[in-house]
Image (cartoon, grey):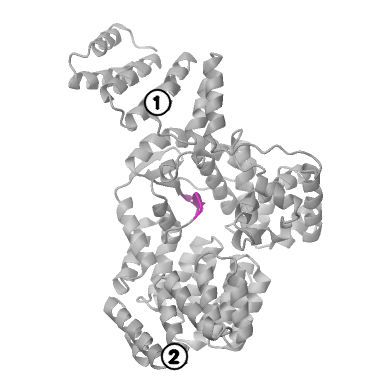
Amino acid sequence: IAAGRAYLLVASGDADAVRRALRAFDAAAAADPQLADAPLRAADLFLARYNAPDARAGYEDVLRRWPEHPRALLGMARVLEFSGDPGALAMARRAAVADPRLADAHVAVARLQFDAEAADSALAAARRAVAADRRSLEGWGFVAAVAWARGDSADLRTARRMADSLSTRPVAFYVTLSEAASRQRRYREAEDFAARGVALDSLDVSALGALGNNRLRRGDLAGGRAALERAFAIDPFHLWHKNTLDLLDQMAEFRTLEQGRFVFVGPAREIDVLTPYLAPLLEEAYDALAERYGYRPTTPVRLELFDRHADFSVRTVGLTGLGALGVSFGTTLAMDAPSAREQGTFNWGSTAWHELAHTFTLGLSGHRVPRWFSEGISVLEERRARAGWGATPSPDFLTALRENRLRPVSQLNEGFVRPRDPGEVARSYYLASLVCEMIEEQFGAAVFGQMLRAWGEGLETPQVFARVLREDAAAVDARFSAWLAARFPRGGRVQVAAGDADLAPLLAAVEEARARGDAAAEVQARERVLWVWPYDIAMHEALAESASRAGQPAIAVRERRVVLALGPADALEARFRLAEALRDAGDRTAARREVLRVLEQAPTFARAQGLLLELRATPERP
């Protein structure tokens, strides 16, 4: 065991040292099967290298022989946390009960409670950690994190003094603070705490990683990359950092398009195909949200698009496997392009609107808004944006309502971070939007801005309810329960609407409009289809035709440009049709430019020759 620990002390940049450490721990376990320390250290090593399956197997093997071994229980709690399993908190508590002197178990409880924005419980667990071991820098880090989140400068100073007294370089204290701040979506402060850690030890991989990742979240790709490269040079086997640096290499080839108040970044095809729709949509969203909340985020807002879901996942959490469609870091947004998902599985327009709404709620609250409220606002704003967008009552939601399995308002965050079943996260998004809908309906439209500003002042949710709604948390729970019962009467029938990414009813609406010869309705119906799947050339061509019939030449031009971006089989024909659309829109200069490009490649193209003659003969419109 001592040999294995020694190998790990020199393992930075040396993969063979890590392998030797693992072999040493395995040899120790073989030499004395009754020694739990050896397999536990091997499992810890696997988890430190993000190998959760082998780590889990190691901890389970120890627990089969020693069912209440506290370190094995703690290891399993960390594996469950890494995997997003809601049983992590219960397992960490079990470890703390098995050995109340195990400070790391109390730290794990504090971290999980802090994730759920349960400040009182997080502080209690952190205080148990430092009572068990006064030298626990992570324990003092969470004492400080709760004090910082609450604006308690006295407790924060006390925790800092303790950390300074324990070590001349208490890097772990500041890394704990940085990670806690990032969990609260307060990325600027997370970057500042990480920078303090790096200032204490410029070779600390955890501090460098926290600094780099939070710079990336704030849109500073160059600064983030620099910090991660320094971390990777010290430990080139850190999977999180390697994945992120590999992604940044790919993103260096992305195209950047500045348009209005937004910067779009993504693979060239995605930029060409998606931004003709996203740019005006997000400008509309920005104006609508700014008017509603009386707040204007700093611009430009950066939106990154990824054509591989694994890349989006790495951009967000450093590892693959994230289930989300988009993320908002404030004024930096990232999301899957529709090509990253199976056709017809999500509405990318609705997702973009949702993420931009987070930019407003995060900014107006100083990134202090609780998750349930920010998500509820975003889903509600989706429903306002377009008919059919946003979450609607699903069979699963109605079943949970009938069986009294929906959480009260005071426990809504738990539904996001510790779901009791696989469907609860999705239900929580819709449920949170209903809470917001009820608050707006009963307290007025201005109430959202008042609540967000109150959180921004550092008030906690019960205090926000008391100041703005003039009710305590229990009263809000009761009010919502009554509102929900009236909205969804047990004996009544509730229509379950089709999802906003369900192609079948959208295509049916297209056919209905086309059959009755209503070109304007057909344009609207086809545009709704494109928000679900924008890569069908035939759909764009048909939309261009219907837009021309409906007297909407600007849409026809847009569609002809997108057809070209998608790489049609007959590119010359597609460019000629673009020239015609530009002529119809009155832009003879652009039309002439396109038809000349056609004739450069096909000088005998008769229709192009005729169009060029027509353009020369027709006077320019004023």
Instruction: Reply yes or no: does residue 326 show up in magenta.
Output: yes
Left or right: residue 576 compared with residue 106: left
Q: Can you see residue 2?
A: yes
Left or right: residue 19 compared with residue 306: left
Q: Amino acid at mark 2?
A: Pro
**Quadrant, the N terminus:** bottom left
What residue would you read off at disc 1?
A: 538
Q: Amino acid at mark 1?
A: Ala
Instruction: Reply yes or no: does residue 528 show up in magenta.
Output: no
Give the percent coordinates (x, y) of residue 3: 34, 90
**Secondary structure of residue under mark 2:** loop
Q: Residue at x 77, y 58 (%)?
A: 466
Q: Quadrant of residue 211?
A: bottom left
Give the percent coordinates (x, y) of residue 589: 31, 18
What residue would you read off at disc 2?
A: 33
**Quadrant, the C terminus:** top left
Give the percent coordinates (x, y) of residue 373: 65, 53
Give whichever of 401, 48 is nearer the camera: 401
**Secondary structure of residue under mark 1:** helix
Q: Classify mark 2: residues with Cα within 10 Å, few (<14), some (14-19) or many (20+).
A: few
Quick one: label 1 or label 2, which is nearer the N terminus? 2
The tag on residue 453 is none
Q: Residue at x 72, y 60 (%)?
A: 410
Task: Using the image, determine if residue 117 lies above or below residue 554.
Answer: below
Residue segment shown in magenta: 323-334
Q: Residue at x 77, y 53 (%)?
A: 469
Q: Classify mark 1: residues with Cα within 10 Å, few (<14), some (14-19) or many (20+).
A: few
Task: Using the image, determine if residue 621 lies above or below residue 259.
Answer: above
Task: Using the image, determine if residue 8 lies above or below residue 519.
Answer: below
Calculate the distance from the C-alpha at mark 1 to the C-alpha at mark 2: 67 Å
